[in-house]
Amino acid sequence: MSSTSIARPRLSFWQIWNMSFGFMGIQFGFALQNANTSRIFETLGSDPSNLALYWLAAPITGLIVQPIIGYYSDRTWHAKWGRRRPFFAIGAILASVSLCIMPNSSALWMAVGVLWIMDASINISMEPFRAFVGDKLPPAQRTTGFAMQSFFIGVGAIIASFLPWIFTNWFDISNVADEPGIIPDSVKYSFYIGAFMLFATVMWTVFSSTEYPPEPGDEEKLRNRERRKIDNEEFYYSKFLKIGTVLLVLALLIGLIVYLLKIEKELYVLSLGLGIFGIVHLLATLYIKRGRSYLGLVNIVKDFNSMPKTMVQLAYVQFFSWFALFAMWIYTTSAVTSHIYNSTDPTTAAYNEGASMVGNLFGVYNGIAALAALLLPVLAKYTSRRMTHLIALFCGGFGLISFYLISDPFWLWFSMIGVGIAWASILSIPYAMLSGSLPAEKMGYYMGVFNFFIVIPQIVAGTILGFMLTHFFNGQTIYILVTGGISMIIAGLLNLFVDDQDEIIIKQQA
């Protein structure tokens, strides 16, 4: 139904502004989640070595939700609400409610459960925003469109990350709770503001933007396609059977090794993930055998195994980029408070000062990202999108590594400049390169599947970082940040091998 293959008119600055504005609110939610969730978990009694395990709720949710939302948003059309905007609105309502509940969690299990719901809700809104750019903008404006999203992500995140500090220093609201196990009021009020901003900005996009209707005959083609069996059923039956069997066997082996060697229980999650993928492939073979290859699950598995070449190349870049980011989000609070502020006790003033510093640092890197997002399209124009992304990832990698060398918190601001440049690029350049390689009618689905290569590295990080912390780094979380920096540099090098199919078109239109 989406028709990016059809020439789209160039949009004005304000049209691109309006269609991207909701991303500011979405990032309010993500920034509050990223900067404060570990703090909430530790306040409610979590051991630092278990943080990665509890955080797995978020990426697992994204892994499930985004491709499903993408698949069905491709197949949605309403004369008034369009294709993507219904999902924007539903996700915003659910996410806003979750943000209000999160800081009022009374137990650790409740906070983990709310994180799961909150992340799913934010993903419902976020995924169609990526496809929205591919739907509406011509190739020459896609880098600008995704960069505008990065700009609003940066603006939203810097305000949201600083909110606890603002409430404490401007309004004299307590940053330390009266008793252990209670979330400070500065954090609670920050989440309430975040809930309001997420709802308001997303609904601004819903009501200020329009969508292109299906081309003549597209709806009829869609109805026919919904009941049409896949081509080459025998080939895909054999392929899915082999893949599913291998994944299940591998899952069982990993689970058995973890059990026999009695190593970290987080590794069971890796086994579970592989097992789920295996079962999904085997279910697809069962449906094909029963003559029901027209079903959505079979098409989802088929399309996943038939990804465009550019998407596969970008998958490796995304893996190492997001592994680094997830390491940073989980362990920056613990690393800064222990390595620089010399405190691991959440009830002390030193710990809470360090935790607030992390919130401010996260605000800074998002602020830098907002500025960098305006410059990335210019740099890409005079070099290339691949070279631009390489430079940005190198900046982020060296920024994370520098945490180890710092003893004075003042110098952390400079480390986060590099991280902010990388963050701006990660949120825009890969999507701009990807959109030109995708079939128009599957834009939403493949943008959702692309989230796999954000989520999978997060799951891998969640399953092995705790193991690495215990067995290789002697409990010193600062080394996790160094590992993240090295991972980001690897991502930059792999980016050079990506086939950016839009480059020729962009040069011709320049």
Image (cartoon, rainbow, N blue to C red):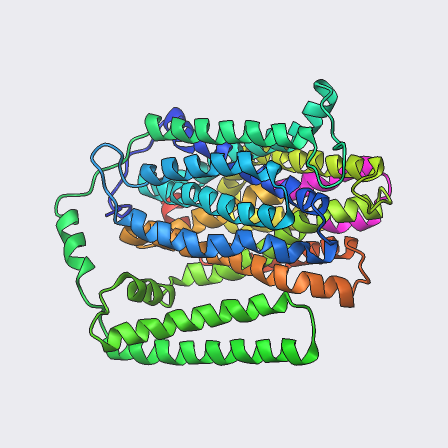
Taking the spot 37% from the left edge, 38% from the top edge, the residue there is 90
488 is higher (above) or lower (below) than 429? below
236 is higher (above) or lower (below) than 346? below
In this image, 224 relative to 30: left or right? left
Residue 486 coordinates in the image, percent (x, y): 69, 58
Who is closer to the viewer here, 281 or 147?
Answer: 281
Taking the spot 27% from the left edge, 34% from the top edge, the residue there is 81
Q: In the image, is residue 374 part of the stretch drawn in magenta?
A: no
Who is closer to the viewer here, 225 or 486?
Answer: 225
Who is closer to the viewer here, 33 or 504?
Answer: 33
Q: Main secondary structure of the magenta part?
A: helix
Q: In the image, is residue 402 part of the stretch drawn in magenta?
A: yes
Residue 168 coordinates in the image, percent (x, y): 72, 24
Direction top: furthest residue: 171
Taking the spot 36% from the left edge, 27% from the top edge, the residue there is 15
Taking the spot 20% from the left edge, 35% from the top edge, the residue there is 79
Who is closer to the viewer here, 395 or 74?
Answer: 74
Residue 165 coordinates in the image, percent (x, y): 71, 28
Mark count: 0
Residue 259 coordinates in the image, percent (x, y): 64, 77
270 is higher (above) or lower (below) than 147? below
Q: Quadrant of the rendered structure where residue 412 is?
A: top right
Q: Please give the range of residues in magenta.
A: 399-421
287 is higher (above) or lower (below) than 77? below
In this image, 439 relative to 19: left or right? left
Q: Quadrant of the rendered structure where residue 93 is?
A: top left
Q: Quadrant of the C terminus?
A: top left
Whether residue 500 is visible to the viewer of this picture, yes or no, is no
Whether residue 355 is visible to the viewer of this picture, yes or no, is yes
